[in-house]
Amino acid sequence: MGCIKTLDNIAKLVYFILMIRKIEIHEFSDSIRFTIHGRNSRGDYVHTRYAYSLKEFNAILKNELAEARSLGLEPQIKRSGEGKFGGITYKNLHLLKQAS
């Protein structure tokens, strides 16, 4: 009985695997919004995450890139509102993307 329940949970997890295709980063003066566009077995999927510090920004970006790369994907990154939050430059973003 426990084995069947575990297999059922694994099947649900596999069903909802998100394939990340694009990450949009928008800077506000007090936060950074990540809009992640992907596709799962049910169709297109969008979810949003927020960072309120550069530490959170780095962690979210690395997490999303690692998740996409674990599926063999390299998501497109698009930015808007550059410079409003401060501290993030294109040079830094490029290095972060390579390091992840």
Image: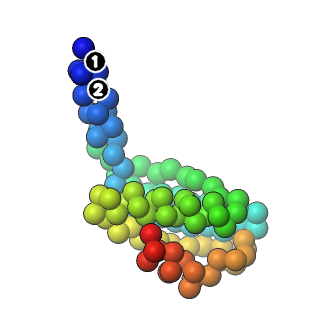
Q: Residue at x 60, y 73 (%)?
A: 80
Which quarter of the figure has residue 50?
bottom right
Circles 2 and 1: CB atoms closer than 8 Å: yes
Whether 84 is drawn above or below 24: the answer is: below
What residue would you read off at disc 2?
6
Q: Where is residue 33 drawn, in percent x and y? A: 62, 60
Q: Nearer the viewer, residue 74 or 37?
A: 74
SS at circle 1:
helix
Report the amino acid beneath label 2.
Thr
Whether 76 is drawn above or below 19: the answer is: below
Q: Residue at x 34, y 63 (%)?
A: 69
Q: Residue at x 54, y 77 (%)?
A: 93
SS at circle 2:
helix
Residue 2 appears left or right of 92 = left
The quarter in which the C terminus is drawn is bottom left
Q: Residue at x 23, y 21 (%)?
A: 4
What residue would you read off at disc 1?
2
